[in-house]
Image: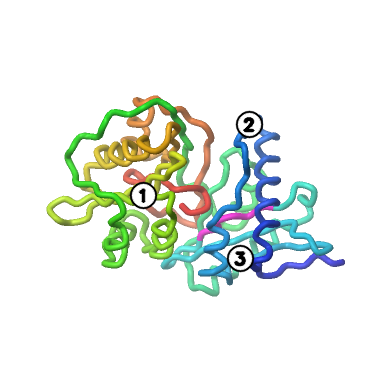
């Protein structure tokens, strides 16, 4: 049977997840990283993408089996490649390049003018593929982890949990995203706010929303986004403190240009676990007041 490229369907989710983990763990092993998690779950973002943006989700299939996948999202004028992976047994055949071409065409059709992706900084094959397609390194990123407890944040801002729906519906979170990232992303917040394992923290100064941050039951922190004049360290420490209440181990993805977050994390015992890099067709974003959620969601 010939190699087939097509849009993904709900029935593909389990197979897509299997290929994702096989490809990621292969990269880890080849570069000396260990992954000891007890289970490798299906990313719930897959189902969300299929429901909200199915036109950006592609799979490669051979002999009836999914052997690769790519999906991307468009927010404003920005196209972002969320995932691109190929079963290690089928790599070297140009499958990843074809999936990328299909994804790039989705961005063009959607009217996006800026292209971006995050990948592991040591994955030379992926870096070369993206650079050949006009995306170049614009920001280094560090996944950092820690297990020690944290002191409460200074009480300089009002932070409340789960008020994000109101701020999302009013457009206040979009205003922050446009200032920090150059794009609104209401679908991201729709996804985050719909997850039971996430808590959204809204920060106001003088009644105006100046920052928001998400903490997760597994200890993940992010995204944490603030306007330029927000007291970012207080925002960050508040969200970290909220995360520490529900998880012993914390993790965050810090842009290299966010000196406040890097210093705060290092002072609090975080260590660098893995380096990533953001590549884009042109520089964008004010990363000195930002923490990423994940490589796939920015």
The single residue placed furthest to the right in the displayed view is 1
Whether residue 227 can be seen here: no
Does the stretch in magenta take in 114? no
Magenta extent: 80-85
Q: Which residue lies furthest to the left in this view?
A: 206
* Numbered mark located on residue 57 in the image: 3
Tag 2 secondary structure: loop
What is the distance, in whole Å, between disc 3 and disc 2 at their CAs? 29 Å
Kindly state the secondary structure of the residue where label 1 is placed. strand
Distance, label 1 to label 2, CA atoms, is: 29 Å
Residue neighbourhood size for the residue with mark 2, other residues' Cα within 10 Å, grouped as few (<14), some (14–19), many (≥20) = few
Across and down, in percent, residue 17 comes to 65, 53
- Please give the residue where the numbered disc 2 appears in the rendered image: 34
Query: Is the stretch drawn in magenta largely helix, strand or loop?
Result: strand
Q: Are marks 3 and 2 in contact (CB under 8 Å)?
A: no
Residue at horizontal 44 percent and vertical 55 percent from the top: 195
Q: In this view, does 273 lie above or below 157?
A: above
What residue would you read off at disc 1? 199
Residue nearest the observer in this picture, 152 or 141: 152
- Give the tally of numbered discs: 3
Coordinates of residue 22 in the picture (x, y in percent) = 70, 45
């Amino acid at each position: 049977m010939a190699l087939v490229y097509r849009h993904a369907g709900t029935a593909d989710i389990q197979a897509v997840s299997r290929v994702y983990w096989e490809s990621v763990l292969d990269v880890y092993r080849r570069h000396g990283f260990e992954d000891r998690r007890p289970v490798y779950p299906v990313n719930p973002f897959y189902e969300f993408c299929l429901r909200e943006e199915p036109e950006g989700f592609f799979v490669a299939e051979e002999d009836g089996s999914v052997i690769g996948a790519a999906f991307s999202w468009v927010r404003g004028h920005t196209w972002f490649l969320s995932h691109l992976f190929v079963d290690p047994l089928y790599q070297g055949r140009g499958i990843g390049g074809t999936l990328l071409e299909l994804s790039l065409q989705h961005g063009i059709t959607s009217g996006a003018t800026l292209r971006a992706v995050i990948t592991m900084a040591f994955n030379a094959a992926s870096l070369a593929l993206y650079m050949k397609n006009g995306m170049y390194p614009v920001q280094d990123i560090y996944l950092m982890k820690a297990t020690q407890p944290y002191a409460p944040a200074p009480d300089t801002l009002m932070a409340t949990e789960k008020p994000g729906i109101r701020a999302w519906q009013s457009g206040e979170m979009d205003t922050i995203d446009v200032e920090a990232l150059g794009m609104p992303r209401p679908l991201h917040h729709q996804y985050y706010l719909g997850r039971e394992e996430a808590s959204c923290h809204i920060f106001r100064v003088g009644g105006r929303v100046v920052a928001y941050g998400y903490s997760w039951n597994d200890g993940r922190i992010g995204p944490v986004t603030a306007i330029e004049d927000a007291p970012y360290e207080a925002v960050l420490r508040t969200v970290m403190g909220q995360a520490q209440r529900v998880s012993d181990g914390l993790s965050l993805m810090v842009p290299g240009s966010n000196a406040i977050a890097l210093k705060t994390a290092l002072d609090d015992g975080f260590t660098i676990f893995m380096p990533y890099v953001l590549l884009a067709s042109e520089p964008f974003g004010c990363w000195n007041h930002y923490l990423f959620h994940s490589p796939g969601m920015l």
